[in-house]
Amino acid sequence: MSEHGLRARLGRTLERAGASIVRPDPRRLDDAVLTPLPILQNEVGGLRRLSEERLRVFLLAVLLHLRQQGGILHPFLDEYVNQGGNTFVLGRPRHMPRFGPASRAPGFYSDAALPRTAFERVLSSSGNRAWSAGWASACFAELEPLVAEYLDRIMPPTLTALVCAGLLEERCIARGCHRVWGLRPDALLLSLNVERLRCARCHHEIAAASDEAGYWEGAPCLRVFCGGAYARARSDDQAYYRSLYGHGHVHRVVAREHTSLLDRDVRETMERRFIASGRGEGWPWDPNVLSATSTFGIGR
């Protein structure tokens, strides 16, 4: 969830290297496109000529933006979501790092502004300059220049259609009884065929599954105030990492401290597991790196 969600664009990830990507279930997306199309055409005057292709791009970006914010409803995040983005609960399990006030935390869509959280308001009155308002303007400006003023008439049927199609899940949280929306994990499919697209103006890059890339070609830049459009990227500077992730022998570092402060039984067990790991006879979770002083260590 982290590799293809919150941290998908941080460092040499699988998505940035073009090794793999998750995309919304195309069948569910087809259902989500057909449901709100006549509603938007009839209720928002400037969108009478809205096409199915343009609405699909709009929905794809809404889902992509939420995924990159980490808005995937994994069971581990249930309490975090229910408390309206309280990062303290994320650090309760011993295996999780602590989340401070400046830490980047998972973000979900909400119907109201929730202070001191990563949740993003998508339903609001005119004048809102959140990402959703900017994206609506970038996507529909040719049809209706003042489309951001109609955000409160565009987003409700859009979110309802995504929920009914099984792409999003809506929850009512304890904090203020607000509504939040997150991606359903079972609505995301893994693809190993990845293409990169680059904005012709600001050079912002995104990755997409190969059979989805055609929808993104010519789509507005996700940097909503850029004004550029995406085209398929010709250069491939990530080929090395893609090959490494796909065919290389990548091993997770499992480090342990090896000092005289350890009990004899613990130390000897660690040494046996470390030696077995070096011979390729151990388990994946056996230590393969030991931190020791120069006077109390063993070689590998």
Image (tube, helix red, strand yellow):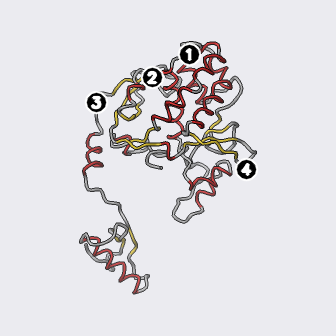
Q: Looking at the image, is mark 2 or mark 3 earlier in the sequence?
A: 2
Q: Nearer the viewer, residue 238 or 185?
A: 185
Q: Quadrant of the C terminus?
A: bottom left
**Where residue 276 appears, x then y in whole percent?**
28, 75
Q: Amino acid at mark 3?
A: Ser
Q: Residue at x 44, y 45 (%)?
A: 4
Pick the front one: 43 or 292: 43
Q: Which residue is under mark 4? A: 174
Q: What distance separates the C-alpha of mark 1 from that of mark 2? A: 12 Å
Where residue 170 sits in the image (x, y, percent)?
64, 42
Labels 3 and 4: the sequence-earlier one:
4
Mark 3 secondary-structure assignment:
loop
Residue under numbered circle 2: 219
Give the residue type at disc 1: Ala
First in sequence: mark 2 or mark 4?
4
Cα distance, mark 3 to mark 4? 48 Å
Three-letter amino acid code at disc 4? Ala
Q: Which mark is residue 235?
A: 3
Which element is circle 4 on? loop
Density class for disc 1 (Cα within 10 Å; few <14, some 14-19, many ≥20) is some
